[in-house]
Image: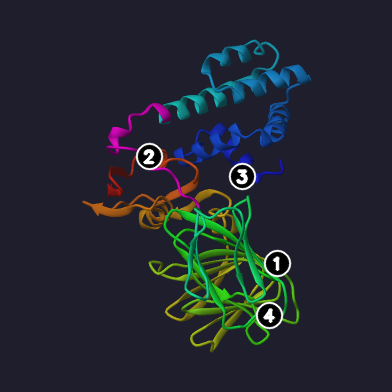
Amino acid sequence: MKNLRLQELLKLYLDGSISDLDLAELWDYVQDPIFEAEIKQFIGHAFDLHHQALELDDAEQQLMLESIYAADPTSIPKARKLWPFVSVAATIIIALSAALIFYVNELKQKNTDNIGSGKDISPGKEGATLTLANGKQIKLSDALNGLIAKEDGISVSKTAAGELVYELKNSSAEPGMINTLSTGRGETYVLSLPDKSKVWLNAATSLTYAAGLNEAGIRKVKLKGEAYFEVAKDKKRPFVVETEDQQIEVLGTHFNISNYEDGVAVKTTLLEGSVRVKAGAHSLEKILAPGQQAIIKNKVIQVLPADTASAVAWKNGFFRFNDENIEDVMQQISRWYNVDISYKGKPVEERFTGKVSRAKNLSEVLLILEKTKGVHFKIEERRISVMR
């Protein structure tokens, strides 16, 4: 199978050792038709592992897949007709589909009064505020698509796909023309700079840059919060990202930076290319290779192997937790759903591993976390109380 994570989740399910967070992630895969072929392949592997002599024809495979993707549990008995022919695979698929359908229905039907009152809270959305060099502010969620600003040979447009695009009409743009794109809590946005570099801004993030992206021959931006960069290659003009505690210099690469004020460290995760990370008034520096992460804490740089999937999960529409404590989990939830967090009683000792869609309403995410039995939540207006 190409998707190793899907394979891992299916094996965990069959072993009976799958966690509730992992089960929720597996349900997301099962609902996505993109993975139909891979699940078919898994069925074939299940036959090989159990030395089954019989092979499924296309019609039988289709019946099995229908039992997986059916939204109505009453359709499951159809798959039982296959039992005389394909005992092992039918057992796998019937059990998988029945359990997952039961699980998701249980989540949907569970009374949200158990964790809160009033209206549910929707997930974040595309939105940001652009501050121009003259101080004018443009709320992009309210702006019409098309040209929204012109500054000294630079045009700024909003696309129908929800992206802010800068175009340099001539090379005379003044370096002092500084713009800032900022997202609030519950907002995210994509920026295309004049050099064709792209930046994805997570919630509660700001990026400051010269409108022409040219400061003394350097492409330079300043970041607060979290962003994912795909930097266009330009050997003559290095691309520099500055944060409060570090400077990152690249020529052309893909990387993620997390630099929130409420975070305990600045994290730079490299996916492609090469970057130089500097800290401590730039007296300390490290060069990262793909798959590495630089962590800066107390002006000390530590380079470790990176969990790249977790680092960029937010960009791909997911929360992804890797043995994280409740405080780190709730920080992400607070920013994306624009809610405040308070902790009551004894500390929550549970650690969380798994993936949850950021497109879900808040109550759905909290119910999934509660399935670990280690934590309980109460929603009041836009405040979440966290209890052991």
Figure quadrant of the N terminus:
top right
Label 4 vs 3, first from the N-terminus = 3
Of the residues shown, which amino acid type is indicated by label 2? Ser
Q: CA distance from mark 3 to mark 1?
A: 32 Å
The x, y position of residue 192, in whole percent, is 64, 64
Residue located beneath label 1 in the image: 196
* Residue mark closest to the camera, 4 vs 1: 1
User: Is 262 in front, or is 134?
Assistant: 134
Q: CA distance from mark 4 to mark 1?
A: 14 Å
Neighbours of disc 2 within 10 Å: few (<14), some (14-19), many (20+): many
Of the residues shown, which amino acid type is indicated by label 1? Lys
Rendered position, 284 above or below 34: below
Q: CA distance from mark 4 to mark 3?
A: 36 Å
* In magenta stretch: residue 82: no
Of the residues shown, which amino acid type is indicated by label 3? Arg
Q: Classify residue 10 by image quadrant.
A: top right
Q: CA distance from mark 4 to mark 2?
A: 45 Å
Instruction: Please tell me which residue is depicted at 48% across the width and 71% down the height of the picture.
Output: 266
* In magenta stretch: residue 124: yes
On the picture, is 338 further left or further right than 219?
left
The x, y position of residue 240, in whole percent, is 61, 78
Q: Classify residue 242 by image quadrant.
A: bottom right
Label 4 vs 2, first from the N-terminus = 4
Disc marking residue 5? 3
Disc marking residue 363? 2
Disc marking residue 238? 4
* Residue mark closest to the camera, 2 vs 3: 2
Q: Is residue 21 visible?
A: yes
Label 2 vs 1, first from the N-terminus = 1
Label 2 vs 3, first from the N-terminus = 3
Of the residues shown, which amino acid type is indicated by label 4? Pro
SS state under label 3: helix
